[in-house]
Image (tube, rainbow, N blue to C red):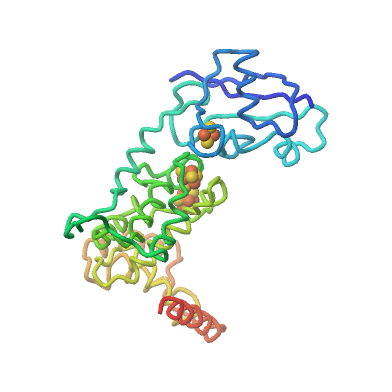
Amino acid sequence: MQVVFKIVRQTENAAPRVESYSLEVEPGNTILDCLNRIKWEQDGTLAYRKNCRNTICGSCSMRINGRSALACKENVGSEVARFAPDAEVPEMMIAPLGNMPVIKDLVVDMSSFWANLKAVDPYVSTAARQVPEREFLQSPAERDKLNQTGNCIMCGACYSECNAREVNPNFVGPHALAKAYRMVADSRDDSTIDRLEKYNEGTSGVWGCTRCYYCNSVCPMEVAPMDQIGKIKNEILDSETVDESRSIRHRRALINLVKQGGWIDERQFGLKVVANNFRDLQGLSSLVPLGLRMIGRRKFPFGFEKSEGTKTVRSLIESVQAFEAQSKS
Ligand code: SF4
Ligand code: SF4
Ligand code: FES
């Protein structure tokens, strides 16, 4: 089968350009096989990362037809079936990962990716414990909790697609938070409270995630970073020692107000979350300009009417809460 590979080429600080390479390939050839042939047979200047060729090292991550994936995992046949099933000469669009600057062609500078991983303290801490004579033992059930996050090969596909990372340079990213959950879940680690405090901070940790699901959908190892972020959020919400942040108040106020009125009473929401029930005077004063603007535009809700479906909504929330409490016990 004849296929045209359209590859985004770029050198640092220069404008990207697209170059096309035509190849005769088999459907079972991986995208990496094809890039190797382009480099060896047509253009030795093409730059990309690779190593294991077997979905293990995470080096060959790139954007293949618009989504971040491993070049050694995806093959031509499935890409054609998905994106160009009727094309006489199908085209493959190959581009570098997003959210990281390009060094050359498909090679990106992953410094921020590694720095953000380091920022979550991705090492088991046993500092406050007596080190046993031989080793810290875990039961099979305790070890099982680490399997999913332990599968991460640090390929960067999730980081490349992360919407939160794109707009918030402080957000550490899905790979780092998946690793963070691995540490929280590790029975040998003795820093859970410190970790939860750290991951609870502002929008650099779990509350920075916009829950777009992209990380879950592109991860080649089924780590499901967004699910791990959700588990950390639950640990934070359940913790009695972690300081109540604005994000926690946001979550609790939202649920309580919807339980009370079937939908959100916006007048109370700001006061509970931003002003912390009149305890945060700075937060309270920050609401004044917004309130005045809303009044000026006749959008301030002076009254509140409960939803007709309040009872149903409340019983739904209570059922979910009872289910959650039961599954934790
Ligand atoms: S779900 Fe959250 S962490 Fe995952 S890609 Fe979206 S914003 Fe990023
Ligand atoms: S979580 Fe998945 S997509 Fe993200 S770095 Fe790890 S293996 Fe890659
Ligand atoms: S070359 Fe190692 S994961 Fe693709």
Residue 143, position as x, y percentages in the image: 40, 60
Q: In screen coordinates, is 265 left or right of 24?
A: left
Q: Quadrant of residue 31?
A: top right
Taking depth in this image into account, of 18 and 260 the one nearest to the observer is: 18
User: The C terminus appears in which quarter of the rendering?
Assistant: bottom left
Left/right placement of residue 34 relative to residue 12 reads right
Looking at the picture, does residue 219 appear above or below residue 35? below
Q: Position of residue 23 (x, y in %)?
A: 72, 21
Picture quarter containing residue 62? top right
Q: Is residue 125 left or right of residue 149?
A: left
Q: Residue at x 49, y 82 (%)?
A: 306
Indicate the position of residue 252 as horizontal and vertical percent values: 37, 72
Residue at point 27%, 69% (across, down): 276
Residue at image location 73% in from the left, 36% down from the top: 77
Vertical comparison of 243 with 89: above or below: below
Q: Is residue 304 visible?
A: yes
